[in-house]
Image (spheres, grey):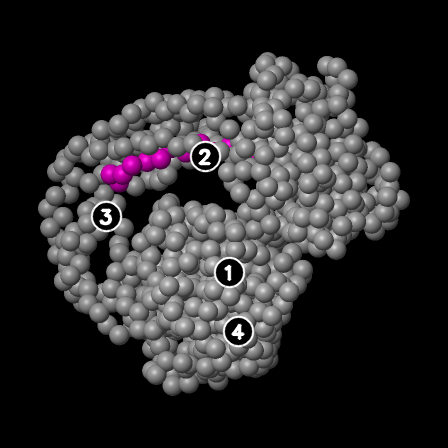
Amino acid sequence: PTVGLHISQTLDFFIYRLLGLVERTKEHALFVFTHRRMAITGEDVTLYDIFPISNDFAVVEVFKCLSRDISIGADTRVRLNFQDGDLEVRLPFGSHSRLFLSEVNKAWSGKTCQGKVKREGWNELKREGRHDLVRQSSHTASNKATMLAMPQFGLRDNLIRCELLKNEDIYTYLENFSFFIGTYNVNGQTPKESLRPWLGSTSTPPDMYCVGFQELDLSKEAFFFNDTPKETEWMKAVSEGLHPDAKYDLVKLVRLVGIMLLFYVRNEHAKHISEMEAETVGTGIMGRMGNKGAVAIRFRFHNSDICVVNSHLAAHIEEYERRNQDYKDICSRLLFRQHDPALVPLTIMKHNVVLWLGDLNYRLSDLDVDDVKDLIAKKDFETLHSYDQLKRQIDEKAVFVGFVEGEIGFLPTYKYDTGSDQWDTSEKCRVPAWCDRILWRGKNVRQLHYQSHMDLKTSDHKPVSSLLEMGLVNEESYKNTFEEIVRSLDKMENECIPSVTLSRREFHFIDVKFMQHQAETLTLHNDGQVPCQFEFIQKLDEPTYCKPWLTANPAKGGNVDIDLEVFVNRSTATELNAGRQQIEDILVLHLDRGKDYFLSVLGNYLPSCFGSSIQTLCQLRDPIQEMPLETIRELNTLLPGGNIHRPLDIPKEIWQMVDHLYRNAPKQGELFQQPGLRSEFVEIRDCLDTGMPDSLPGSNHSVAEALLIFLDALPEPVVPFSLYQQCLECCSNTSQCKKVVSLLPQCHKNVFNYIAAFLRELLKHSTHNSLDVNILATIFAALLLRSPTKQDLAEKRKTQEFFQHFLVQDLS
């Protein structure tokens, strides 16, 4: 288990750390990690120190911190004694900390019956490299003492859930648990006024607060390094603005660049919060940049699973399809790990209640600014709402299927002159719109109010709030119902062996393409007398149950439809392009307490320039899919410098994309920063791979993103891995940087110089396209100079400094 903590240095100053209990060969130690922000993945943390739990270890003092303000809450302070000193920590309230201390005490108690712990073993782990000791994802063990946490009954689990659903009316009733949901796009501003008119606007104090911000910080530092002092400033403003008639604890803060979500609960409800998790997903350029995307939390309150999503979707009035795509990307990519790592991660929709808030950026269509303002003056919001893009997309079932939004009876929340209630008077004169929205999904939810707050004038948006009342589970009735179901199922157990019928055992995937999803469905029909559980298991001497381009969803479960999904990306395309791998695999479907079934997966992959090497592509004068497969395989076996015939100077595919952008996009705003459409990328990929049509389709943004994906998919980057270290060492010396580039293989050197020259041309039009050296260096250095191992922040800065030399002067 891991838990967030504060290591105390003085009474009023704290350093934020993560504390983890680690077991190794029946010995235990406490690992202390530092982190630059709210830690979501292993990349966010660094191992700081290791403290073995030995006979000298002791927990000498435990007491509750008295809250001096509502942002701290009733935390637990603990002093830990070690062989070399002591450590004072403050653990956040809640079940996670209670469970963590319980596990630490178990480990300590175990040592009192054993000999001395060898500290040298743990010191050896430190020397092995701290980054290697950090797992790519961390999650906290569930609170098994919570009565409402459903036990894992294996084969019976699905049936128990079904019976509980049938008897839901017995143990569900509406109770006054109120959730205040708030969203505010602050346009990069610092807090300049009290948030009490927004957050304290309810007559009685809410039980929960879910407060979301967008555009918290618009600086380049926040965009590229996810660091901002404004996180603390706005968190303090929120804490001071909550309802004054109750005390609140800050349970979770999660941020991605400028998208931040804070979750507060009243003190008396803290003990009922468990299984808290947080995740983020970026939907900016290449689906990675966090200027657009979402942050989310999920938790269990009493016996209800609740998910809260704060999102900032694509801007501009005409980009509603891009907003739809952002929504779908967030739903598919934002996954919460379960406390049992063997279980499939939870999607947003796998919760009893989903609360979705944020700057969704949907605008008003088919009306000019004067018509909109006329309807606003008449307060004819019903007519105005009929032109709302989000309403139209929901009516067409394109997005937010199953969600509810309350009736809108307030002024559009965008765009105002900052510091006033006056509509935008700038040259652009934006059409007013309801960009900032709150929706929900789930049973037993009732909205008490939905409004904007005109008193706040810090931003060009107005904040919005919704007060929701939720019906939750009657714990005692739930317990009794649950136990009765279990007793009845006990009689059925072991009566017969599980058995299933498979709808098919062979699966064929035809013409698989790079980054194009294909899926086939396998239906399991339970023809036995008891519930059954399946799992795909590894074959002998293989690390996973399937090839990396194949996924079974779900990979384990009960009587369900299973999607076998094929998706070839940058990590798998190279081997398939070269013919060293084929679309073929055997899956072993294991039935718990039953037999194994073998499934055959076959198909063919259409070679692509994406994922092919620069050397191979320079040998191809025709589109790659017009070449015989044997020729492609032969080219992929050539040693560097070996040629079948005189190669092209650069791959024609790079020339096509760069030439298209050079002719059509030198003055394009937000180039390489605004993502294109996925449908257009498919057309661009097919054009490059087949030669049809003659010119590249799609928007400038789609072609720009295709170029970035192409460079990212190269098996050997433009600057080969072998020269990466030299680039870091000479990054501050222009002549040495030029010397390293002169050492590149000829075709790689040509590509490097060609791209650098193109980017210099773009910089000549910076007044139109808003590009600068820092932006281009940050984006392209990460693609042209990829690290052969994990890259830290210092290395990223050095690669950017290296590439900047080729953007600020003509080196031809």
Instruction: Specify which label sits upstream in the sequence, 4 or 3.
Output: 3
Instruction: Specify which label sits upstream in the sequence, 2 or 3.
Output: 3
Could you tell me how far apart the alpha carbons at marks 2 and 4 are, in whole angstroms? 41 Å
Label 3: which residue?
157
Place residue 794 in its image quadrant. Answer: bottom right
The residue under label 2 is which amino acid type? His
Place residue 740 in its image quadrant. Answer: top right
User: Which residue occupies 42% across, 25% down?
Assistant: 509
Instruction: Specify which label sits upstream in the sequence, 1 or 3.
Output: 3
Residue 517, label in figure: 2
Please, what secondary structure does the residue beneath circle 3 have?
Answer: helix
Which residues lie in the magenta part?
Answer: 558-570
Residue 235, label in figure: 4
Please, what secondary structure does the residue beneath circle 4 have?
Answer: helix
User: Which residue occupies 31% across, 31% down?
Assistant: 522
Could you tell me how far apart the alpha carbons at marks 2 and 3 are, in whole angstroms? 32 Å
Whole-percent x and y of residue 671?
A: 66, 48
Discs 1, 3 touching: Cβ within 8 Å: no
Residue 740 appears anywhere in the view: yes
Examine the structure image and report whether residue 567 is included in the region drawn in magenta.
Answer: yes
Image height of 759 relative to 461, above or below: above
